[in-house]
């Protein structure tokens, strides 16, 4: 694999990434190369390593082997300022994780104000712009526990976008939502995909993956078993494991 | 039942209703009357009168009651000793005030030191662990004696020699070790995901602690902290060991002079005058806090 030339190579590369929690090996040599503006959907059974992969990319958990490169630059190398890297990457979690003691506006502006040193007025102007775009302008002064799950998750997405991330990681962002609230969050993600934001999504929403993904990756036992454009992967899966998984998903009515 | 348990879902009144949590100053007592009805109320009153009335009768019929009454509850001695004891109590209040300023700050610093992660912070963590182990492990009485008599005896230049200073120092060291553990339990109770999302938006470890974790942690432990305040308020009396003329010391001086213990009752009542309202307030605050938390869930 070449691609160390910063601007022409892939946006994000995972090279033989290993990660264990204690004795439990979660990532077992992940190889993945993601181009700028690609939307990658990670699918696979629970425990296959989707969330761990995303946490490792955002340097929230240190990896045990291999390398992760952003714009060709190894972010998992020694001496890299993790805070600096995290400011270039956005991540949204399944359980929203808004700060319960702050209003939406404060949640959203905390990062820019404290990590980037942006003036409050400027941060708030930018925040209002984004909240407006995602239909949350009237919720700016509400507290997270006063809002629905869908509103929480949209606010969490706005929070992750405040630093203008080069990549957005989404970790099963609709899994905790009531079914009727899933749509509003997915439409936000679709909007981001249309604007050309590079995204990696761990998801169980196969229909959505088929719609927005440029490639779908099937993870099994900590490896990328199969990666292909959605039509190919859903239409003609190569591996038995992938077929089994998709069969079960279809059975459950999720595709 | 647990103070730190997850807020109960859906048990609160309608979120759009006007219902404000009832201000329970006597949580438990007034609740009982509200829930159990008139008949049960009558039984409760009767059994209460029977119990305390019976106790009063028993005590007053004891053969020694008249002499005990004169020794402990003599009105003349009460008014004779009250001014000095009261003056001493003012000193207790002042010392309490200073300790209250020092303890929360010191304790928070220790708790944060202990909660920092990463190999670079190892020395700080060790320091915090040693501190809490040491000062929680020494009985407060001994700490007061050792610091209060020991340090001034060293006659080191520059160190204060006032007994009050070392009394407060001993109280602050001991209580901040306990309080640090309370804070730490509050920090640990904040979900790991909160720390993750703070780091994810680019905050440093310290900023995540300061802006995301600590505000939630402190709120978690306010009731426990307030109980510590009640306890501290009484333990201030221990510094009388050092000969400081606080309420207890003044009461003792009066007793030594007159062989009458009423002065101790004066001191007791003064401490109760502060600690009972304080305790009621803690109960009230805890109940309100719990109501707010269960109500704020949609």
Image (tube, coloured by chain):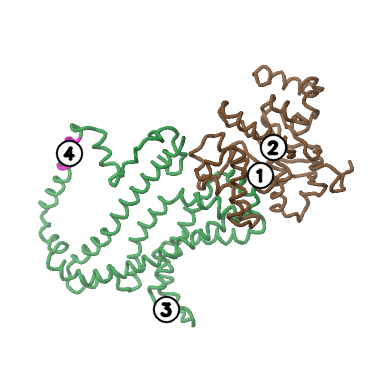
Q: Which chain is brown?
A: A
Q: Give me the chain letter of mark 1.
A: A
Q: CA distance from mark 4 to mark 1?
A: 65 Å
Residue B161 image label:
3
Q: Secondary structure at mark 3?
A: loop
Q: Do tag 2 and tag 1 residues touch (Cβ < 8 Å)?
A: yes
Q: Which chain is green?
A: B
Q: Which residue is mark 4?
A: B47
Horizontal and vertical percent position of residue A211: 72, 27
Q: Do tag 4 and tag 2 residues touch (Cβ < 8 Å)?
A: no
Disc 2: CA contacts within 10 A as few (<14), some (14-19) or many (>=20) = some
Q: CA distance from mark 2 to mark 1?
A: 10 Å
Is B214 magenta? The answer is no
Q: Which residue is mark 1?
A: A161
Q: Secondary structure at mark 1?
A: helix
Q: Do tag 3 and tag 2 residues touch (Cβ < 8 Å)?
A: no
Horizontal and vertical percent position of residue A184: 60, 31
Is residue A183 found left or right of A12 in the rendered image? left
Is residue A164 found left or right of A240 in the rendered image? left
């Amino acid at each position: 694999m070449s691609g160390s030339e910063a601007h022409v190579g892939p946006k994000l590369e995972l090279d033989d990434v290993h990660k264990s929690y204690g004795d439990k090996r979660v990532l077992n040599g992940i190889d993945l190369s993601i181009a700028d503006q690609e939307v990658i959907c990670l699918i696979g059974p629970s425990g296959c390593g989707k969330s761990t992969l995303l946490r490792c990319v955002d340097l929230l958990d240190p990896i045990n082997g291999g390398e992760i490169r952003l714009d060709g630059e190894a972010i998992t190398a020694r001496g890299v300022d993790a805070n600096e890297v995290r400011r270039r990457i956005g991540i949204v979690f399944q359980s929203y994780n808004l700060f319960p003691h702050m209003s939406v506006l404060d949640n959203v502006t905390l990062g820019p104000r404290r990590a980037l040193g942006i003036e409050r007025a400027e941060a708030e102007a930018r925040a209002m712009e984004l909240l407006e775009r995602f239909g949350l302008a009237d919720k700016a002064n509400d507290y997270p526990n006063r809002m629905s799950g869908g509103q929480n998750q949209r606010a969490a997405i706005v929070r992750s976008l405040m630093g203008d991330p080069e990549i957005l990681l989404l970790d099963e962002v609709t899994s905790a939502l009531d079914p009727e609230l899933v749509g509003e969050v997915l439409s936000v993600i679709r909007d981001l995909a249309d604007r050309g934001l590079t995204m990696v999504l761990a998801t169980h929403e196969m229909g959505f993956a088929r719609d927005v993904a440029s490639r779908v990756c099937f993870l099994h036992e900590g490896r990328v078993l199969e990666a292909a454009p959605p039509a190919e992967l859903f239409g003609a899966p190569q591996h038995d494991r992938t077929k089994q998984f998709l069969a079960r998903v279809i059975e459950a009515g999720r595709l | 039942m647990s103070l730190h348990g997850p807020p109960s879902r859906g048990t609160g009144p309608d979120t759009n209703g006007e219902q404000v949590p009832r201000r329970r100053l006597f949580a438990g007592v007034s609740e009982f009357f509200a829930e159990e009805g008139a008949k049960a109320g009558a039984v409760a009153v009767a059994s209460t009168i029977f119990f305390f009335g019976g106790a009063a009768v028993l005590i007053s019929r004891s053969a020694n009651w008249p002499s005990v009454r004169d020794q402990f509850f003599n009105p003349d001695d009460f008014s004779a000793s009250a001014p000095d004891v009261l003056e001493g109590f003012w000193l207790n209040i002042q010392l309490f005030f200073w300790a209250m300023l020092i303890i929360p700050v010191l304790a928070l610093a220790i708790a944060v030191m202990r909660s920092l992660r990463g190999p670079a912070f190892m020395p700080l963590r060790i320091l915090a662990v040693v501190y809490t182990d040491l000062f929680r492990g020494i009985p407060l009485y001994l700490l007061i004696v050792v610091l209060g008599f020991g340090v001034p005896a060293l006659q080191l230049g520059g160190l204060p020699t006032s007994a009050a200073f070392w009394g407060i120092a001993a109280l602050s060291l001991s209580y901040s070790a306990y309080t640090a553990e309370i804070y730490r339990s509050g920090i640990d109770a904040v979900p790991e995901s909160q720390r993750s999302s703070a780091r994810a938006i680019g905050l440093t470890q310290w900023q995540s602690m300061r802006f995301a974790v600590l505000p939630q942690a402190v709120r978690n432990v306010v009731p426990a902290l307030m109980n510590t305040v009640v306890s501290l308020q009484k333990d201030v009396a221990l510094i009388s060991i050092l000969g400081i003329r606080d309420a207890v010391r003044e009461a003792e001086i009066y007793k030594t002079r007159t062989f009458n213990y009423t002065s101790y009752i004066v001191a007791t009542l003064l401490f109760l005058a502060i600690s009972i309202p304080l305790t009621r307030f803690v109960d009230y605050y805890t109940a309100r806090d719990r109501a707010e938390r269960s109500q704020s869930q949609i």
